Amino acid sequence: MFRSVFFLVVVAFFALSAAASDYFERLTLTPLPLGSLLASFDFRANETITDYESQNYRFFPRSLGQALRHADTKELHLRFTTGRWDPETWGARPWNGTKEGGTGVELWAWIEATSEEEAFEKWSTLTQSLSGLFCASLNFIDSTRTTKPALSFQPLGRYGDGDQTLHLLHGVLPGEVVCTENLTPFIKLLPCKGKAGISSLLDGHKVFDASWQSMAIDVRPKCSSGTEPCQMEISQTIDMVLDIERSKRSRDNPIPRPVPVEQLVCDETKPYHSQEACYPRDMVDEMPWSLKEVFGRSMAGVCPLVESEGPEAKSVCLNVPHERMVLIGVSGFEVKSDPGLPDSRCYQLMPLEEFDLELPQQTLGGKTDLGHELLRAERTITGHGAARGGMRTVFTNPSPTEPVKFVYFESLPWFMRPFMHTLKAQITQTEFPFEWQTITDMYYRPAVDRKRSTQLELVMSVPPASTVMLTYDFEKAILRYTEYPPDANRGFNVAPAVIRILNDTDGNGPSDNIYIRTTSLLLPLPTPDFSMPYNVIILTSTVMALAFGSIYNLLVRRFVGADEVGDGKIRGLVKRVRGVIVALKDKVAGKRQKVE
């Protein structure tokens, strides 16, 4: 009884404080073609600078706040990403790519320091703290994996006038495997910690079974010009693309099995259709699904810290046409978007009540506009052999009228030595009749062996309806024997390239930041024969054994002549040998007599 009363008092306290607080969470669901579903979880909380500096945290996680303050980090961006976004099928990237990182783990932050050496020391402190906090290998981001971008990233926070010099540092681990060990500390940073609200839908089996998944944490200061005090904002997002059919499969039946014959969907309009031959029909209908089927559980009410009134009180939004049938329970009510805006509907939920929505199978006349990317990029490694190679990146502008201007950022490992005199950018396909300058600016920072990686930033532009190919050659270095990993023949990971779309000077370009990241690459390096050391050890051990045995034999053994041995001993030995021989002869002769 006392525990229940105490729990109600705590919930009431948080509910009263939430009215004057700034905590927001929302789940946005967007059906995609070919039976996919985009689920975007968004959590945001604001903390005043006064409470943040005095460590009087209400919504900001204390563990993360202490790590940032100890490393003098003013702004932080951390990404955990797996899979590859398919722009041709799924359309534009969520959040314009700002919440997405390269494959693996990506981290960049603005650190307050008086010199670059001090900034790197604080950067090392930050990576080690985040490594223990998120159960990731961020402590492996050393000087060889750290760069200082000059054009690719801009601070999103608004700082006060009293801040000192800020240093931007960027690190990436393309080979890091993102798993449930990273999701669990991510959920623990939330105020409701997965017990209520949209975070109750997060299950590691569903999240990491997605075709594409990205977790992002952004911390930035917000200072307005008015009388309002500065705030520290933390934003946590999870975006994933789920396969509806695979997600609906129960955990007791994880292995896909053949569909029974009576459940096959065949295209009976084909002339070769028969009872023995079935041609699968294209799924043009909207597939049926519900929250409980896709995520394996219902939504456990609303987080008590979310505001109960206003536009931010709607915790679940669904981007479907208005004519799409959606069934919900009595624990929420629906609000559709206004005419003229993109079709969507949001749901305001009742506290302490489970919520679920269901979309039955239905045929729709039109298709939802999912948008398109302003630029397409493909990056590959060319060449053959173990000494040299080449890098080729193809940029395609799908717009028939507008050019695209962007910053291309590459972070290459030190053992991948590019030749800048071979850098070329040529237009391979175009309908643009005028001459065009593809590279307008360049920032290059060469690598230092085993100390610093190569940093390349290019300001480029692609004319309308054109394709630009960027190429350069590089040389492969030979590593030391101890620098090779156990899976050296697999190859070495090369971090994805980062593309930032820039605004045009005349205002025709995009107003917000748009980021695109290419896929990571595998670089084969000259690999020695690791069996040779064992052969050398075996041969050396054999030679040492023979040499030691011979020398020891010569030093220890005593050589004695035959004449130095006493005559009595020799005669006694001869008599014993003769006696043995005579006994054997007598035994053999006795056996013959018995036989006769």
Image (tube, rainbow, N blue to C red):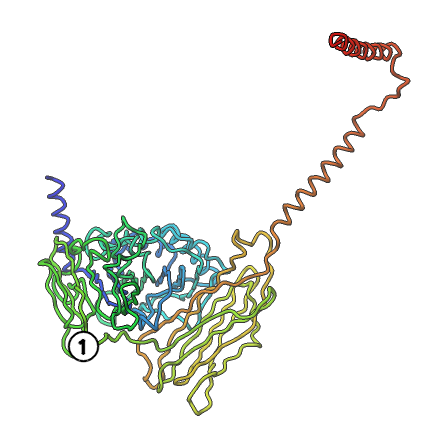
Q: Secondary structure at mark 1?
A: loop
Q: Does residue 483 appear anywhere in the picture?
A: yes
Determine which quarter of the picture holds residue 281. Answer: bottom left
- Mark 1: amino acid: Leu
Q: Position of residue 341 (x, y in %)?
A: 18, 77
Q: Nearer the viewer, residue 129 or 486?
A: 486
Please give left or right for residue 529 compared with residue 116 in the image: right
Q: Does residue 58 appear anywhere in the picture?
A: no
Q: Nearer the viewer, residue 257 or 108?
A: 257
Q: Nearer the viewer, residue 232 or 536?
A: 536
Residue at 42% of width from left, 82% of height from top?
Answer: 462
Please give left or right for residue 50 compared with residue 119 in the image: left
Q: Position of residue 558 (x, y in %)?
A: 82, 23
Q: Position of residue 20 (x, y in %)?
A: 15, 60
Q: Nearer the viewer, residue 48 or 240?
A: 240
Determine which quarter of the picture holds residue 581. Answer: top right
Determine which quarter of the picture holds residue 357. Answer: bottom left
Q: Which residue in the protein does label 1 denote?
A: 341
Query: Looking at the picture, does residue 96 appear above or below residue 402?
Result: above
Q: Residue furthest left?
A: 330
Residue at 30% of width from left, 56% of height from top?
Answer: 258
* On-image quarter of the C terminus: top right
Q: Position of residue 188 (x, y in %)?
A: 28, 51
Q: Residue furthest bottom?
A: 433
